[in-house]
Amino acid sequence: MLNRTEAPAFGLVSDIQFIKPEHRTLRNGIPVFSLVAGGQDLVRIEFIFENVDHAEGSPLQSMAVNNLLNNGTATRSAREIAESVDFYGAFLQTDYNPDHASLTLYTLTKHLEAVLPIVHDVLTGSTFPADELDIFARNQKQKLLVNLKKNDFVARRLFSAAVLGNTPYGYVPQPEDYDQLDRGTLLRYFAAGYSPENCTIVAAGKFDERSFNLLDRFFGADWEVKEKAAAQQFTPGEPDARKIYQEVPDALQSALRLGTLTINRRHPDFPALQVLNCVLGGYFGSRLMANIREDKGFTYGIGSGLASLKHAGYFFISTEVGAEVSQAALNEIYSEISLLQSAPVAGEELSLVRNYMMGSLLGSLENVFSHADKFKNVHFSGMDYDYYSNYIETIRTVSAERLQHLAQTYLRPEQFVEVTVGKK
Amino acid sequence: MVSFTRFTLDNGLKVLVHEDPTTPMAVLNVLYDVGARDENPGQTGFAHLFEHLMFGGSLNIPSYDEPLQRVGGENNAFTSNDITNYYLTLPSENVETAFWLESDRMLSLAFTEKSLEVQRNVVCEEFKQRYLNQPYGDVWLKLRPLAYREHPYRWATIGKELSHIEQATMDDVKAFFRKHYNPKNAIVVVGGNVKTDDMKVMAEKWFGSIPSGPRYDRDLPQEPEQTEARTETVKADVPLDAIYMAFKMGRRTDPDYYAFDLLSDILSRGKSSRLYNSLLKEKQLFSEINAYNMGSLDTGLFVIEGKLSEGTPMEEAEAGIWTELQRLATEPVGEAELTKVKNKVESTMAFSEMSLLDKAMNLAFYELLGDANLFNEETSRYHAVQAADIMQAAAATFTKEKSSILYYLKNA
């Protein structure tokens, strides 16, 4: 007779294999990191540019440049670019984060030769036509007006601006900023930021010698350095206010966001802090979820996270709770933090979190694209795969006492910025 | 090409196994053939509330999540108007834990008052977060009852109103479980770094002894053919006017589904699409515009939704959409444009095969449609669509008599 009360035997994840990239360079020195795997005839090629200093204007200029990259060159209109990429079933996508801007090509490898000339045209000869800029500015502004009606969006902005301050990381666009966008500034930013000197290529999937040679043919020569760029600076100040409240009349829910500047991936405590974050709010069974959702029913979801940027890191907790329980939820959040500071995590819970995090790491390496993402995490932090060895070792061995100490060191509510949008 | 082996246990449970040795993980996906369409009109939102309760502990296992996390696994679920789908991923060597957990909650839930009480609250907060406390969040609460008069698609999965969730009782919940949650109404897909023979043994061991339960024969009121144009206007605290146009189309399993799906690609997929170029870029009537179909198992909807550019009169914006729809109904799509959308479908299918979870979910869904292997035939079905099929689908669908239009206006 089957005993359903007894869990089946299980094993611990012991062996995690990373696919590491091969590093080569194009003739002009652009580094190409390629990760080859997968049965499908597919490849993803990312052209990644470090964000450079905004000599003029705001970071909105660099966001706009990235977004408008594939909207016109000297020889192709926005529509022609889209038509030719789509015709080959390829995808050309722009991405922007506070440290990098990128252009990513997804294509069947057999069409690589056909689509690379378009990518080349976009990266070297975008012209940012005035009418495209007008449409972009107007529509983005309208999108922003819609988002400003969302409490969680507003809370995120208030939090970023307070914690990351007057830096490129803390910048949040205001609707009127879109009216200030100027084509000349975009062109100058494009010249400075999108240069071979500032470019890293990461390719993942079916990428062979021929693919590399194609990259070299299109990007290894004939791509001049136009303007020398300065690096972004990051010097945050102290937040003006610790508690920020924006009332929304008739809100059914309040968006809460709280946290502080903290260490980033480069700091030796970071892996252990990730374990602590997981215990607190990093998975479905976390203490915040168990208490505030599964016990109290205050919210649909609550979580915490660590963001690692090149020049900074920050810790945050975010949720949307019933408007009438905003304060009760905040009290519970602080009491969970206080508990982590005052008592070590119990052995059963810690072993569960260790196993969960190992399984989660294994699961996050689903395909060659995810392996490439793991590479980028360390590469752009100026680190190598030792980071992951250390991360795995830390998950396995970090002690409850060390986690308690980290909670006392890094999770200090008196340093938090606490944002409430909705009702108190 | 996604290969699989299929077998049926004596209690009626269908099981599919997909071997993928390139991953160290395994996936177990359990699809229950029950969705919001199976609810009674006085108790809407039940299928979804029930999905939440499925995580509240089962007959022999007090906590669902804890043992799964302990073996390095993660899980989630979703409810639609048609199905409820549960999935979990974990290191493949621990796949038996997945069988243990999923079979016990198919056998019976713990049904505690505490779990019901908490999940009623959680779902009410979800209702607020996603539908009520968001700009335009209640669109589907308005559009569904406009487009559907008889069929249970007239309510959203979250339910018609908060009170239906608030008033759910333990007896209601138990009855729902008995009716829908049994082997005959489920499809299990296990995939990843597993061996088919081992999975047969495990499936038999854990699911084989679950009683097959009563058969649920779906007999839903079908939607009568729509013969009159329907409109509704709402005003709300939003920054921009918006329009939502819904047209009746066929079922997901109808042969012309593929023509409809390509129609939506032609209209709004990416920056080379028609609505984007004509209405957003050239005429600048809209700041956002999209077309999609709901892929519903019963009479479906083809939807066009857009947010108007500041200052654009609604009549002008709507006329712009009608012009594009008329073009599709009267002029055949050119060869290059048709090839383009087909190529896009083909590469999207290829990219989706890179995800084990996507493969498992698709196998389960296509098995529900009649045969999991349909998934492997999808690309060729899209390729078979001709320009005339698309024109015919457009002409038969994009008429005033089949339209339900919601004008969502900002407060003056």
Image (cartoon, grey):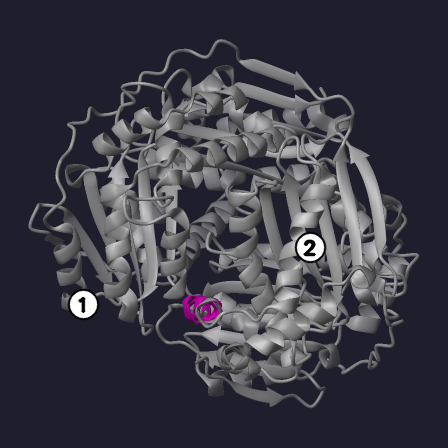
Please indicate whether residue B317 sits to the left or right of residue A281 in the image: right
- Point out residue A266 in the picture as x, y percentages from the top left corner: 27, 34
What's under tag 2, amino acid-wise?
Trp
Q: Main secondary structure of the magenta part?
A: helix
* Residue at mark 1: chain: A
Residue B161 placed where, x, y %? 85, 47
* Number of numbered discs visible in the structure rendering: 2
Considering only vertical position in the picture, is B313 above or below B180? Answer: above
Quadrant of image for the N terminus of chain A: bottom right
* Bounds of the magenta segment: B340-352
Residue furthest to the right? B42
Up-down: is A267 above or below B398? Answer: above
> Height in image: A297 above or below B259?
above
Say if labels 2 and 1 share a chain: no
For the point 49% across and 84% down, which residue is it? B4
Q: Nearer the viewer, residue A161 or A28?
A: A28
Above or below — where is B142 with respect to A325?
below
> Which mark, residue A208?
1
Label 1 residue SS: loop
Residue B341 lies within the magenta run: yes
Within the image, what quadrant is residue B363 found in?
A: bottom right
Q: Nearer the viewer, residue B334 or A151?
A: B334
